[in-house]
Amino acid sequence: MAQLLMQDFVIPTAPETDFLPLRAKRYRPSHPIPTGKKKVALVFTSSTGGAPREAWQTSIERLFEIQHICKRRTKTLVSEAWALELPNHESAAIIGDGPVAFDATPDASSWLARALRRFVCSNITSVDIIIPVGYADSCPALVLATVGMDLHRHPMIILVEPLMTTHQVVTAPVKTRWFHSRPREASSYASSQYDTPSILSDLCRTHPVHGIFGGKSPFVAAAVVSLKYGRLTSITGIPGAGHQVVEEQPFKLAERIFSILNPDDYSVYKL
């Protein structure tokens, strides 16, 4: 596995909207990055329910390893990867003298959407392109963050096992829902996120949006189309993984992300 250079950052808050700072960890490969190619920063977000940012680390290591092997052929190189941390995750849960109460609520998604905009506008990265990669119920925040954002530096978005739905689906019988039926998870998008499908549909008309699912996931890819989320640029399945694809198949997930970034090297199944 490729060795990683890791560093923690704190991005200042916006006092008019948020009092909680955004904490992030930057990963860079220990080997030199070739010059003369477009440099990309991947920005990973985890489930708002409390999954740690380090959940992405194995996939990040594998991604840098594949890239190093294929460096002569690839046109786009990931020079750094960032894992954002919600206020209820790990070190970000301790601010000042005590823990911060921050649950997986609609406010969590709105906060993350604003945090993503702050990250993009902070100029903390030294790259040509920034590509967000969301997982589970953080995916609606990625979609919401694009509203009003200048997307010229963001050529695509990658959604891994996205948990998004309309308000009507949230209140429908469990068998028709495209997400876990646990109330805690449902609460994270049952209110402020009910319009994300229409936002995503509009986004898909002008911007590449790639979906990645666990091959055994109950959130089948067909649900994306049937719920009228819009026609995604690509939908891929990770064999041997369910909804917890980030932890169950991190190598295969990294390979799929690399294939999306470099389609000439690896094929991506197109709808």
Image: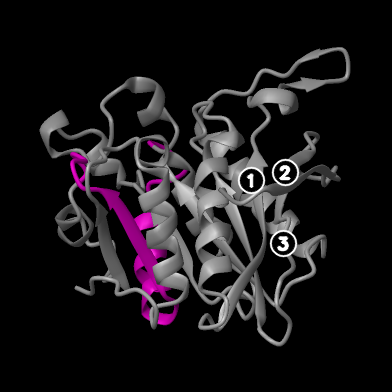
Q: Which of the two labelled residues, at mark 1 and mark 2, occupies the earlier sequence position?
A: 2
- The label on residue 25 is 2
Direction top: furthest residue: 98
Q: Amino acid at mark 2?
A: Lys
Q: In the rendered view, would you say 143 is above or below 201?
A: above
**Element class at badge 3:** loop
> Do the residues under discs 1 and 2 have CB atoms within 8 angstroms?
yes
Reply above or below: 270 against 11: below
Q: Earlier in the sequence, mark 1 or mark 3?
A: 3
Question: Quadrant where the C terminus lies?
Answer: bottom left
- Mark 3 is on which residue type? His
Q: How many marks?
A: 3
Q: Amino acid at mark 1?
A: Ala
* Magenta span of residues: 190-219
Give the SS element for disc 2.
strand
- Determine crowd level at label 2: few under 14, some 14-19, many 20+ residues with C-alpha closer than 10 A: some
- Residue at screen point 82% across, 65% down: 123
Left or right: 6, with 239 as reference point: right
Query: Label 2 to label 3, Cα distance in Å?
Result: 18 Å
The residue carrying pointer 1 sits among few (fewer than 14), some (14 to 19) or many (20 or more) residues within 10 Å by Cα, namely many
Q: Bin the neighbour count of mark 3 within 10 Å (Cα to Cα): few under 14, some 14-19, many 20 and up.
A: few
From the image, tell me which residue sits under label 1. 83
In the drawing, what numbered circle is on residue 47? none
Disc 3 target residue: 31
Q: Nearer the viewer, residue 104 or 62?
A: 62
Residue at the image point whose x is 52% and y is 42% from the top: 58
